[in-house]
Amino acid sequence: MGYTDQQRVLGGFLREEGNDRIIPGTDIRVVKEMFHSKNGLTIPASPRLPGLFRDFFPTVDASEVNNNFSYNVFLPAKPEKGFIILLHGLNERTWDKYVLWALRLASDTRKPVILFPIANHMNRSPRTWFDRHAMMPAVAARMLSEPGAKLTTFANVALSTRLSISPHLFFLSGYQAVNDIISLTEEIKSGRHPSIGSEGSPDIFAYSIGVMLAQVLMLSREKPLPPESKLFFFCGGSALNKMNGTSKLIMDSKAFDRLISYYIDEIDEKQKQGGDWLTKIVDETAVGEGYYAMSSAARLKKVFGDPFRDLDGRVKAVTVSSDRVIPPAGIKEAMLGADIDTWLPEYPCTHENPFPLFTTGYAGAVDSAFDRLFTSASAFLA
């Protein structure tokens, strides 16, 4: 059975009840583990908000969901040493497309694969943020307040509103997520994890904005990843200012414009004026420094030189020529000297949906591309 047929059968597997289940037709168990994040930051309060938008900002319930959550581990019957952390894209709220990704990596490498959610994404965010019925009034309100915004949808209105009003939340989510990943790897390596052994190294399969998290981990002067860790990047790797986040599934145009203005122009002006709480984090933490560097290729060069060159085979990146959200040119500029392959897909696809489901015509091409990618990734990470 190829990818297309398997995805139709297994895509909703993680929505079903149960904490310890076998994926049908395989020897891969999926278990849920709990995580408590102590890595969130206390930040200045957001400005006064219109009623419809208040629920998009920190509340007691939202903070509870973000800081105490479960994550799924795909466990082969006789696992090899080490483990793989799979990192997802920006503004994603469901794991459906990643079930087969994790299954393929676990089956082929025989290593445990962890689906770990970025802060305020996936099951670390309120379910209403991706509910069409609940979000449509907010869409109407945003279109009135931001009449020039393009591609405002029920799927992106929560993130668009959050970033337009408080663009620092982009950094804070990433900061918390990177530190959560460091905490997770330390838990495993110390022998305290209930499902994964302490032997072997952590590897990463990262997609889209998840690649930036992985890059920040690599750039950190505190070296949370051991030198034997390997990282496979898919459709990601450019600096922030070379991305185009305007998308029906990610954020609208006004939100992306605000994001770029804040991180490319305003943050340097704040530093020139003596700084604030955000520039203090950037200046005084290894994670902050990494995110600052990855905001533009020029900053990356200034702070770290060409950090992805001559990595002794630790990093491999694959992108597709048609990607408009994180274009190949930006990836090549930021990752100068790295092992990067640019593929030309033989079917219509987008950054947000690299393996679409077709009933006829292109299904075979999609199946072949999926198999090619995960054969390559599994061989690299095994």
Image: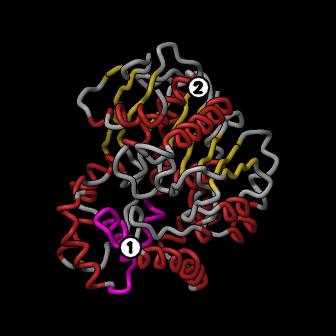
Q: Residue at x 60, y 54 (%)?
A: 216
Marks 2, 1: nearer the viewer: 1
Q: Residue at x 33, y 84 (%)?
A: 146
Residue 211 in the image: x percent, y percent? 58, 51
Between residues 76 and 282, which one lies in front from this camera angle? 76
**Total numbered badges shown on the rendered structure:** 2
Q: Residue at x 51, y 57 (%)?
A: 350
Is 237 displayed left or right of 85 in the figure?
right
Residue under numbered circle 1: 151
- Is residue 221 at least partly visible in the picture? no
Task: Give the number of the disc on residue 40.
Answer: none
Task: Residue type at mark 1: give it.
Answer: Leu
Q: Where does the C terminus fall, quadrant-wise?
A: top right
Between residues 69 and 297, which one lies in front from this camera angle? 297
Above or below for 251 versus 182: below
Badge 1: how crowded within 10 Å, few (<14), some, or many (20+)?
some
- Is residue 76 at least partly visible in the picture? yes
Q: Which residues are magenta?
A: 147-173
Residue 119 in the image: x percent, y percent? 40, 52
Secondary structure of the residue carrying tag 1 is loop
- Determine the residue located farthest toward the top in the rendered image: 78
Structural distance between the alpha carbons of marks 2 and 1? 42 Å
Residue under numbered circle 2: 82
Is 122 displayed left or right of 98 in the figure?
left
Dividing the picture into quadrants, the one containing residue 251 is bottom left
Secondary structure of the residue carrying tag 2 is loop
Instruction: State yes or no: residue 166 in magenta.
Output: yes
Residue 289 in the image: x percent, y percent? 62, 62
Q: Residue at x 44, y 27 (%)?
A: 74
Above or below for 285 versus 49: above
Task: Residue type at mark 2: give it.
Answer: Gly
Instruction: State yes or no: residue 292 in magenta.
Output: no
